[in-house]
Image (spheres, grey):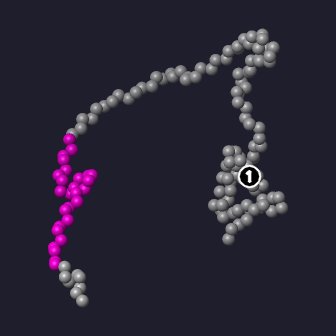
Amino acid sequence: MDDPVQQRPYVPQQPQPSVQPVAGVSKEAEIMPVKAVDIVQIPEYERPSEVPPPIEVVKAHIDVPADLTAIGVSNSPHDVPAIQATQGTTPSMPLTDDQIGEGLSKKPSSSFRWLAEWCRRQLMKLHITLQKVQGHFIRVKER
């Protein structure tokens, strides 16, 4: 049998064109000399020594018309914040294991949940997990 490799005539390969870098400077390029740059001194901004406060607190008494007073509208004192804090349990630090377990069952939008998640993460760094046993959480050391 005739070997197909031996039947083909020898054709020398054409040299591959050299690939030039797309960006940057090739090795053969001449480096251009750096031009001298003039340094200009810019005067520093001097802040006035006495700056007025940005917000001025004005306590004014607003006269409420009689028809609105009859409905129940009244002036509120200026010292009372407009938004009251939400009523809820404020955990005392450090959290107990039961408080951490209770916090893990809260909604994800609750700040108490994220405090409990952070505490659980700190325990996990120490290779400790929480398990619920007879209604209470206990720490279990991983082996």
Q: Residue at x 77, y 43 (%)?
A: 89
Please tell me whether residue 138 is drawn above or below residue 2 in the rendered image: above
Query: Where are the magenta residues, as a range?
Result: 9-35
Q: Is residue 81 magenta?
A: no
Q: As drawn, is 54 to the left or to the right of 29?
A: right
In this view of the protein, can residue 96 be seen by the observer? no
In which quadrant of the rendered image does the C terminus lie?
Answer: bottom right
Prevailing secondary structure of the magenta residues: loop
Secondary structure type for disc 1: loop
Position in image of residue 106 (x %, y %)? 73, 49
Q: Residue at x 42, y 26 (%)?
A: 46
The extreme bottom residue here reads 1
The extreme top residue here reads 66
In this view of the protein, can residue 64 be seen by the observer? yes
The extreme front residue here reads 1
Q: Residue at x 21, y 40 (%)?
A: 36
Please tell me whether residue 90 is drawn above or below residue 27 in the rendered image: above
Q: Residues within 10 Å of mark 1 (few under 14, many from 20)?
A: few
Q: As drawn, is 18 to the left or to the right of 62?
A: left
Q: Is residue 32 magenta?
A: yes
Dot 1 amino acid type: Ser
Please tell me whether residue 143 is drawn above or below residue 37 in the rendered image: below
Decide which of 58, 103 is in the foreground and name it. Answer: 103
Position in image of residue 101 (x %, y %)? 75, 55
Query: Splitting the image into 4 quarters, where does residue 2 fall?
Result: bottom left
In which quadrant of the rendered image does the N terminus lie?
Answer: bottom left
Q: Residue at x 77, y 18 (%)?
A: 73
Position in image of residue 54 (x %, y %)? 55, 23
- Which residue bears the numbered disc 1? 105
Decide which of 84, 20 is in the foreground and name it. Answer: 20
